[in-house]
Image (cartoon, rainbow, N blue to C red):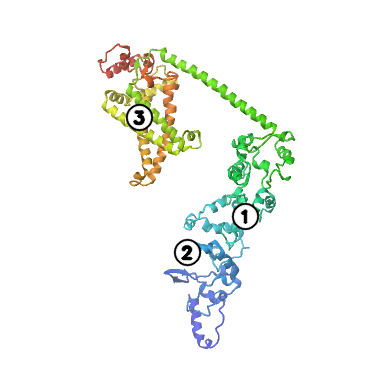
Amino acid sequence: MKRCGMVLFVALLLGTGAMAKSAPKMSNEDCLACHNDSTLSKEENGKPVSLHVDDAKFKASIHSVFGCTDCHKDIQAFPHDPTPAKPVCVTCHADQQTAYEHGVHAKAAAAGNANVAKCQDCHGSVHEILPASDPKSKVARGNIPQTCGACHGQKFVMASSGISSAPFNSYQQSVHGKAVAAGSGKAAVCTDCHGEHDILAATNPKSPISKFNVPVTCAKCHDNVRQEYVQSIHGQAIARGNWQAPVCTDCHGIHTIKAPTDPSSSVASANVGSDCAQCHGSVRLSNEFGMPSGQVNTYLSSYHGMASKMGSTTVANCASCHGVHNILPSRDPRSTINHANLAKTCGQCHPGANEKFISFKVHSDGVAKADFSSKVIGYISKFYIWMIIGVIGGMVLHNLIVFRKKLILHRIGQPRILFRMTRGQRVQHIILLGSFFTLVLTGFALRYPSSWLGTLFVNEAVRSIVHRVAGVVLIAVSLFHLWYVVRTPDGRRLIKDMLPDWKDVTDVRDAFRYYLGYSDQRPLFRRFTYAEKAEYWALVWGMFVMANTGLMVWFKVGVGERVPGWWIDVALAIHWYEAILATLAIIVWHFYGVIFDPDAYPMNWAWYDGKMSVEAYEHEHALDLLAIERATGSEEEETEPVEAAVKEQEETVASKK
């Protein structure tokens, strides 16, 4: 500030004589006498703005060949009164400014977006701008991704503009981004594809990333590939203006381009099939362009397709036969799948392939052919389909007849005189069973509409009604059961016998010791084993959860008026996972106990008529003395309480141990 004051003092002394003559042009040294002071600033809109110009950086910049007043033309002398206007880049860079004004950045700025990149955001401070040839420049080739990423890599900056930061982050992981980061001076950077000052949206036909311009843009680096592509069936279609034909980015990706050797690349060997299937697996091509349908499906059903799905990286995929960038129709003599070239193409994997080898059909369009081989295959298919139906159907019928008879013999083989379940309990169980599996089928049909479950129902309206009716039935039988265990003697005894106690803990211990071979004494159970009690209370819990979450989803509008909407999403998640848990528990746990357990196989018929044989019941529930004595007629119903009998039996067993 002292130097600045000295200049002012000298100017005042000499002012009288000098005013009569034209003021001399100020030199850079005159300006830097003040502006080289790092503390120099002014207040603008209530905020301090630095007026400091670093002398060393300015002299190293591309603008150092100019004088300060070449840009600040309205500055004649010191002090600056009035405040000089800010210089504009367009004064010297009119062409670049014109290009910029046509781009997306300028249009966004005109729309009021304050985060849009301007000259200094990309090139740096006007007094410190370095030429693009300088490795330290922000617009040096190796630094362009970092410069663009200052905005496009920031999630919150881009979100305010309604644009995702994902493309830039994907570029960093791409083959181009990694090569630039490794110091390659040839790998593509942002400006190679998007342009520099006149960056245009992909929807603009003049944009280098417009679909029809992508091959030309990529050809800047990959011209040898472009020469093959433009002659291919895809390149010819693009040249005709067919926007549905694929260009480079449709197969390789846009910012996510990766090397074919990268397993995550869309053009990796294992992924080529799914990449091509995006177009060739749809009916669009066959409907609009008359191309054969079913090509993808026939490939996937072949050995090549099945091995590819199993993870093989050496088996033939689409590109192995059709080519990569040089794909041509089979009628073209240059095509790798032209009949004249097919033996050579197949010979890449099958050395020695000849005319006979290539006579089989690789793809079929699903239309019956008139040639001899197709007729033979058709006859064989029909013969085996009917033979499979007849032979396997006969086997199934035979086994059902035998199984039915053996079930009957098993039921009558032992006197089944002990009542395990009352009629009311059996009715509750059957209604519970029917409504539960109806809910399972209708629920999973919605989750997996393309599976065989989805074909069980005429349409979604029918499935939805059936699911809700089954849910109401399940809730109703649950409420009835609650009344049953509170109001009836059988129900009260049922719930009393179902209450867990310490013996269940010791039974678990003793059961594992016995079944693992550490003990010869099998634990003796009362009316309900620990497994049956666990299943019963799990059912109670599951019913409570499923009923409440199901009703929340059913009446989501009413629920949404009282609680936040995300509660419905939580209820849906709980409903889904609880359904999986309940279904697997029934199949794995309950079905084992009543069907697949060797002691019960082929079925415990108590669910049907409520009866068991005394021998089987004594084996499973030896301590339920009251039920056993009633069945054998050794004691009238007015016997001593069952608790005393059980206690006596337990003491007897303990003494034997």
**Spatial separation of the CA atoms under disc 3 and disc 2:** 63 Å
Identify the element where label 1 is drawn.
Answer: helix
Nearest the eye: 351 or 64? 351
Identify the element where label 2 is drawn.
Answer: loop
Nearest the eye: 196 or 445? 445
Please tell me the numbered disc located at residue 337: none
Using the rendered view, name the quadrant where residue 478 is placed. Answer: top left
Please tell me the numbered disc located at residue 112: 2
Front disc: 2 or 1: 1
Locate residue 571 relative to residue 309 in the image: left or right.
left
Q: How many discs appear?
A: 3
Mark 2 or mark 1: which comes first in sequence?
2
Name the image quarter holding the C terminus. top left
Locate residue 416 relative to residue 26 in the image: left or right.
left
> Is 142 drawn above or below residue 335 in the view shown?
below
Amino acid type, label 3: Trp
Nearest the eye: 334 or 546? 334
**Spatial separation of the CA atoms under disc 3 and disc 1:** 66 Å
Q: How would you rate the neighbour count of disc 2 (Cα within 10 Å): few for under 14, some for 14-19, many for 20 or more?
A: few
Mark 3 or mark 2: which comes first in sequence?
2
Amino acid type, label 2: Gly
**Spatial separation of the CA atoms under disc 2 and disc 1:** 31 Å
> Is the residue under label 1 in contact with that under label 2 (CB below 8 Å)?
no
Mark 3 or mark 1: which comes first in sequence?
1
> Is 613 drawn above or below residue 199 in the view shown?
above
The residue at which mark 3 appears reads as: 537
Please tell me the numbered disc located at residue 212: 1
Q: What percent of the width, then of the height, locates residue 29?
A: 56, 76
Q: What percent of the width, then of the height, locates residue 44?
A: 44, 70
Q: What percent of the width, then of the height, locates residue 567?
A: 37, 44
Q: What percent of the width, then of the height, locates residue 565?
A: 38, 46
